[in-house]
């Protein structure tokens, strides 16, 4: 993100909006489920990593 900002303000704004939206989704899910749940402990890291990969790929491709 630090590199993208000075190079392309529109792309930076789009990626920042996506990151903000995904964080809101994560926080919402966290509020709706028990963080102690086995499913949460299994799925949360997978979802988090998947989101990071999609964002990374979107910036690289």
Image (cartoon, helix red, strand yellow):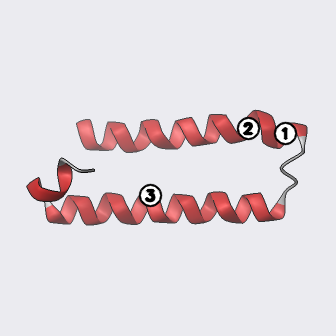
* Label located before the other in sequence (1 or 3): 3
Q: Residue at x 44, y 58 (%)?
A: 19
Q: CA distance from mark 1 to mark 2?
A: 6 Å
**Which type of secondary structure does the marked residue at label 2 adopt?**
helix
| Residue density around tag 1, few if under 14, some if 14–19, many if 20 or more, within 10 Å | few
**Image quadrant in which the C terminus is located:** top left
Tell me if label 3 and label 2 are in contact, CB under 8 Å.
no
The alpha-carbon separation of the residues under discs 3 and 2 comes to 19 Å
Nearer the observer, 36 or 22? 36
Q: Position of residue 36 (x, y in %)?
A: 89, 45
Look at the picture and state if 32 lies above or below 38: below
The residue carrying mark 3 is 19
How many C-alpha atoms fall within 10 Å of the one at disc 2: few (<14), some, or many (≥20)?
A: few
Residue under the point 70% across and 65% down: 28
Disc 2 target residue: 43
Could you say whether the residue bearing mark 1 is in a helix, strand or loop?
A: helix
């Amino acid at each position: 993100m630090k590199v993208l900002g000075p190079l392309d303000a529109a792309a930076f704004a789009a990626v920042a909006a996506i990151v903000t939206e995904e964080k809101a989704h994560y926080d919402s899910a966290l509020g709706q489920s028990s963080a102690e749940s086995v499913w949460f402990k299994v799925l949360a890291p997978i979802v988090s990593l998947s989101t990071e990969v999609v964002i990374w790929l979107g910036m690289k491709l």
